[in-house]
Amino acid sequence: MKTNHPSHATRSGLTLAVLASTAVLSLPLSAQAGSPQNIQATITLDREHTSIMDRLPTGEGVNEFRGDDPNAAAVAYTAGGKIRAALGYNRTILLDGNDSNKVNAGRTAYLDFAGAFECPNSIGVDLDNNGVCDPCVNTTPLLPDSRFGALDTDDVSGFPDNFNLVIAGEDYDDLQIGCTVDTWARSEFEVGTSGSEGWVLYWGPFFTAGLVDTHNPESDPIKVTRVSLTEWRFQTTGEHRAALYYRYPNYTSEYHGQFTVKFSGKVVALPGQTIPGGNHCNIQVYVGDAGCTP
């Protein structure tokens, strides 16, 4: 069990929700340092993994992370209730599904952990860089079959409560049109927990905490491309490896190995906003450490 940094959790509740029916997640526009701004958006998650170039299925099968209507071809999350979807928020792409304890006040997402590499086949991690690989625990969260439902005994798939999805990066709002960048992503969710306690998934081989931690070393990156003035697309790549952690209230993290957890989708700006044109092709993420060798 290794210590993480509080910067990994900027919210008291871990949230990660995807809407089953269309709803618009609204976030007030506010300027950041320089030209970046928050762009209110609809964020759509696909059922089948799609290419960011043409949005056609890639033949890689059903996603393991998708909207809360897991059989729908695509599920959109837009401004409704406490759900937020934005581009440029904290210089990231943000999908924040819900932080309410009311059944009808938010939405969730569907996760499937069937594609486990198991600890022996997962890349080793060493979060505190002490030269010793972190222990790995071969368990997954007991995901309920419905939001706030009873914990499922299959230990594989279901609907976690209070989730968010952050695709890291710098200044997506004025990314150059036609530019594709590599980055990392983090998803947090609760299963019968509260506060800073809960489960966290990481995708991508980059530093995830101020050039300190590499939660998913030697994995394949998330790709994001801006295809027009108002649309951005994203997808996992390669083996789609996500690293799973359990985070305790004191921010120590327990590594649970790597899983195949694919996702893809798009961000479309809501009408009536000032959308900056592109002027750069760099979102400032940094290559992390190599995996730990026992």
Image (cartoon, helix red, strand yellow):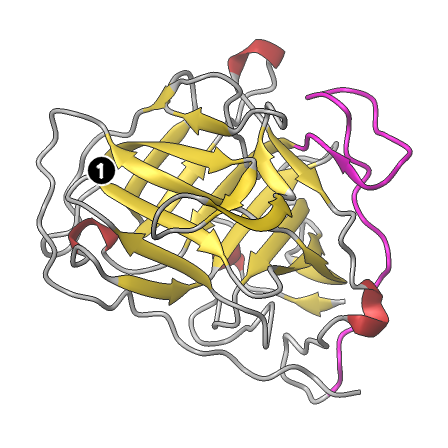
Answer yes or no: is residue 12 visible: no
Of 22 and 46, nearer the camera is: 46
Say which quarter of the image contains residue 279.
bottom left
- Residue at position x 48%, y 16% in the image: 21
Say which residue label 1 marks: 39
- Determine the secondary structure under disc 1: strand
- Residue at position x 83%, y 22% in the image: 150
Which secondary structure class fits the magenta region best? loop
Near mark 1 (Cα within 10 A), the count class, few <14, some 14-19 or many ≥20, is many
User: With respect to residue 20, does 155 lie above or below?
Assistant: below
Of 36 and 3, nearer the camera is: 36
Of 42 and 50, nearer the camera is: 50
User: With respect to residue 108, does 248 lie above or below?
Assistant: below
Q: Position of residue 155 (x, y in %)?
A: 85, 40
Q: Is residue 174 left or right of residue 50?
A: left
In magenta segment, residue 150: yes
Q: Position of residue 8 (x, y in %)?
A: 51, 56
Q: How many marks?
A: 1
- Residue at position x 25%, y 41% in the image: 231
In magenta segment, residue 147: yes
Which three-letter amino acid code belongs to the residue tagged 1?
Ile
Q: Position of residue 53 (x, y in %)?
A: 34, 52
Say which quarter of the image contains residue 160.
top right
From the image, which quarter does the N terminus lie in? bottom right
From the image, which quarter does the C terminus lie in? bottom right
Q: Is residue 245 left or right of residue 79?
A: right
**Magenta range:** 132-160
Q: Position of residue 40 (x, y in %)?
A: 25, 32
Answer yes or no: is residue 174 visible: yes
